[in-house]
Amino acid sequence: MPNSGAVTRRQLVPFAAVSATYFAHIGFFNPYLPLWLKELGYGLFAISVLTSVQAATRLFAPYGWGWLSDHTGERVKLLRYGATVALLCACILLFDLSPIALGLVLLIMFTHTSSMMPMSEAAMAHLVSQGGAFDAKRYGRVRLFGSIGFLVTVFMAGAWFEYFGMQHFPGWTVLSLVAVTASVWLLPDLKEATSTSDVKEAIWPVLRQKHVLWFFVTAFFHVLSHMGVYVFFSLYLDSLGYSKVWIGVLWAVSVIVEIAWFFSQSKWLHRLPLTGWLLVCSAAMTLRMGMTAQWADVLWVLLLAQALHALTFAANHTVCVALLSHYFPGRLRGRGQALYTVIAYGFPGVLGGLVGGLLSDRLGLQSVYWVSMATALLATLAAYKVWRMHHPLANFSTPN
């Protein structure tokens, strides 16, 4: 058995590298893309439209990639293709582009990077599930490398852009995607076995289950609340007079607590059923958005609000992946993970970006966070519904 565990750890190392490089790319790209677009002279609504392109690709691309990977078993080959095309698109950002050309390049790039989260999460969830139980400890230890990658680049990029300017943003994009592409090509070229019965297994009977539907409702509103952070947080802080260094620090705080949670989550997750954690995380999101809306100019309050990221993202993410692994087992795993990306990130991303852009343009950036607080409350009510309907699923193993 110990040797078996060692083999499992060796299998997870490449996934840790992919997680680290992918989220290192996200760590600077998502927080500073709005500021780069602002530097190019775009207004708030145009910025919200261009940043929403990423979410728009999540309406169709993840499920398409998930369907293809489930039917072919070629997750690694598809990941390599997606990373390589995204890198080529990033190189085009080095040139002066019209708004339409920029939107098109981002569309193609995001369509291919969107394959990485559902396929790598599906493959990793399979590896860390032992005897039908989701191993939170192993998952957290791998996923924290992504958080570390995010932390390094969000802090370094903030300092770099503060002193050297936003004109280097395209160069950072290319270099980070070089790292992503290299790590993906280092993954072992493993093909998952497929069978006719598995491929034909329908996903709709699962979706018709009431607790699964309510799970997706709470996921939708929970991530919709996060759009105030993902799209507008850097602009909001910039409007309040925070320097780019402090913007990087405040992003970094959220990632530090995220790392702490992923490292230690196996000590806490067994204390509540998974559906109970959904409720706690959404309630924490309601509090976080209220604090950010009302007291963003008070540094210590904003630091506390960012510290809630341990619950609003890290805990929530692990719980959702574990529930998805339970709801969509076997050959449904890739499509289940992709469907979660579409419903929880695609639709909320487009809606949050566009509506948030209109709100911020007419009522100011603070209004986005009051609306985010309201949607977090809806997520809390939906999570309560799931908790009341669901049998506890505290099926975590914590091997020594």
Image (tube, rainbow, N blue to C red):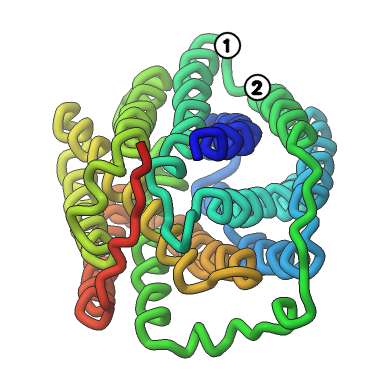
Relative side of 321 to 221, left or right: right
Q: Position of residue 5 (x, y in %)?
A: 52, 37
Tell me, for residue 138, which label it has, or none.
Answer: none
Report helix, strand or loop for mark 2. helix
Q: Counting other residues with Cα less than 10 Å from the Cα at mark 2, is it few (<14), some (14-19), or many (20 or more)? A: few
Residue at image location 51% in from the left, 70% down from the top: 343
Answer yes or no: is residue 103 visible.
no
Q: Position of residue 37 (x, y in %)?
A: 60, 37
**Residue 138 lies in what quarter of the image?**
top left
> Nearest the camera: 7 or 340?
7
Q: Image point 51% across, 49% down: which residue?
A: 128
Q: Position of residue 354 (x, y in %)?
A: 50, 61
Furthest toward the front, the residue is: 1
In contact (CB < 8 Å): disc 1 and disc 2 = yes
Residue holding disc 1? 164
Q: Which residue is mark 2?
A: 167
Q: Amino acid at mark 2?
A: Gln
Query: Could you tell me the amino acid type at mark 1?
Result: Phe
- Which residue, as the protein is rendered here, is positioned at the far top? 163
- Image vertical order of residue 66 relative to residue 79, above or below: below
Judge whether 47 appears above or below 173 on screen.
Answer: below
Looking at the picture, does residue 44 appear above or below residue 342?
above
Q: Position of residue 44 (x, y in %)?
A: 50, 48
Quick one: 120 or 257, which is closer to the camera?
120
